[in-house]
Image (cartoon, grey):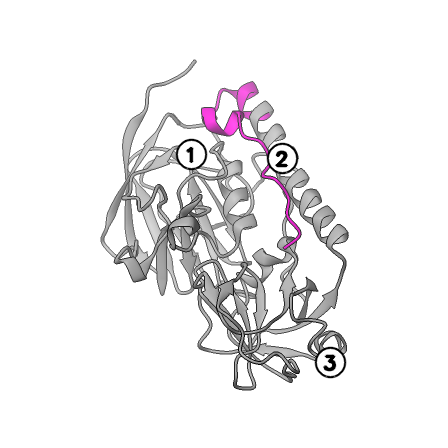
């Protein structure tokens, strides 16, 4: 039986350090000079939406640190992904990376995130929010911050009508969820050649044999890393050119910058490497103090890594759709028709 949508109020009582509406970013906006933006950890954001039957592109919440707490006026289904955190429902600990069926009025608290920067909270249905160039993703430089505040009530339009689950401490569903490993003390990030790699003597050995530390001034625009660098030789003045997400830039100072989803679209600094696309979500979780090193791979391997990452998400979608159909839970039409995005090397 298909129920009509109803409006559900989600009352945010604690909003963490920085919590925003988020999705996977703007499509084709870069042709108009606006960064695509979107979730820093695209994998976790997509998985959260898939777990509640949404399109992976649906609006969710990105929560960065502190305590986030909410109650809902009606029964809701949600999922929490991202770095390890403590999630409780009326004081009882529940699991991340799985659908949570919550009774009306239940108090949900996310706290004590560790190992990275961000958690993602998705609800079954559509969150009501403003959009800029077709996306709910923040773009603060354009006056579109999308930040949540304590005491704010957000509206969810949902066909979910509740599902009996008397023992919240036990998993309701067992699904093939591709959960990233945030536990290593030093993260290894795969990279491919950039346009100035061959003009930078020793850069391959330097990046793969050194540890770098994420600096405190890092954000959605990019990560600033402390560690050894070498500068390209004989380049002269570089004409401003397009820069991809994940580009490794070495500006005039002795600093390594990895550009994120809210980067400017052109720059005149040398690009000595580019993060493989499958590694971008881990970079989106790198918090100040995080140590990392880099592994060089070929373009073909980078493409296959991304394809494999997308195959895991597609398999999860298939399992969620089949399970939800069997027990009568809603699945969005766009989610059921979704296909994996085209792979790219970087």
Q: Nearer the viewer, mark 1 or mark 3?
A: 3
Distance from disc 1 to disc 3, alpha carbons, whole Å, reads 51 Å
For label 3, the SS is: loop
Q: Position of residue 188 (x, y in %)?
A: 69, 67
Residue 89 location, x and y as percent? 42, 47
Tell me, for residue 124, which label it has, or none: 1
Secondary structure beneath dot 2 equals: helix
Write down the quadrant of residue 122 in the picture: top left
**Of helix, strand and loop, which mostly describes the magenta segment?**
loop
Cα distance, mark 2 to mark 1?
Answer: 18 Å
- Between circles 2 and 3, the one closer to the viewer is 3
Q: Position of residue 24 (x, y in %)?
A: 46, 46
Residue depicted at 58% across the width and 39% down the height = 341
**Which part of the image, by quadrant, shows the N terminus?**
top left
Query: Residue at coordinates 44% horizontally, 76% vertically from top-left?
Result: 217
Residue 212: name its quadrant.
bottom right
2 and 1 marks in contact (CB < 8 Å):
no
Is mark 2 in CB contact (under 8 Å) with mark 3? no
The image quarter containing residue 227 is: bottom right
The image's mark for residue 314 is: 2
**Which disc number belongs to residue 139?**
none
Q: Is residue 164 magenta?
A: no
Quarter in which the C terminus is drawn: bottom right
Magenta stretch in the rendered image: 323-346
Instruction: Inspect this view and state whether residue 154 appears.
Output: yes
| Nearer the observer, 279 or 172 | 279
Q: Nearer the viewer, residue 237 or 43?
A: 237
Image coordinates for residue 177, horizontal then vertical, percent:
63, 42
- The label nearer to you, 2 versus 1, is 2
Comes first in the chain, label 2 or label 3: 3
Q: Which residue is mark 3?
A: 201
């Amino acid at each position: 039986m298909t129920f009509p949508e109803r409006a559900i109020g989600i009352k945010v009582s604690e909003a963490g350090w920085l919590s925003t509406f988020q999705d996977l970013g703007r499509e084709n906006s870069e042709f108009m000079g606006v960064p695509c933006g979107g979730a820093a950890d695209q994998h976790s954001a997509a998985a959260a939406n898939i777990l509640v039957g949404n399109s992976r592109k649906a609006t969710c919440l990105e929560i960065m640190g502190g305590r986030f707490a909410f109650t809902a006026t009606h029964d809701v289904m949600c999922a929490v992904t991202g770095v390890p955190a403590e999630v409780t429902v009326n004081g009882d600990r529940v699991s991340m990376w799985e659908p949570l069926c919550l009774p009306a009025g239940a108090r949900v608290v996310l706290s004590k995130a560790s190992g990275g920067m961000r958690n993602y909270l998705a609800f079954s249905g559509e969150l009501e929010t403003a959009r800029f160039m077709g996306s709910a993703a923040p773009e603060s430089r354009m006056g579109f911050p999308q930040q949540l505040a304590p005491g704010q009530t957000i509206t969810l339009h949902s066909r979910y009508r509740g599902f009996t689950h008397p023992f919240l401490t036990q998993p309701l569903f067992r699904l093939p969820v591709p959960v990233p490993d945030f536990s290593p003390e030093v993260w290894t990030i795969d990279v491919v050649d950039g346009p100035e790699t061959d003009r930078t003597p020793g850069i391959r050995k330097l990046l793969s044999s050194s540890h770098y530390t994420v600096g405190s001034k890092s954000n959605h625009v990019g990560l600033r890393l402390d560690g050894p660098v070498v500068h390209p030789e004989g380049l002269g003045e570089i004409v401003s050119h397009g820069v991809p997400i994940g580009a490794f830039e070495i500006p005039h100072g002795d600093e390594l910058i990895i550009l994120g989803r809210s980067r400017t679209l052109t720059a005149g600094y040398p690009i000595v490497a580019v993060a493989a696309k499958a590694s971008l979500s881990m970079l989106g979780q790198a918090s100040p103090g995080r140590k990392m090193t880099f592994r060089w791979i070929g373009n073909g391997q980078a493409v296959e890594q991304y394809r494999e990452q997308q195959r895991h998400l597609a398999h999860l979608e298939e399992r969620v759709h089949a399970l939800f159909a069997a027990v009568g839970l809603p699945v969005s039409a766009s989610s059921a028709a979704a296909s994996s995005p085209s792979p790219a090397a970087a």
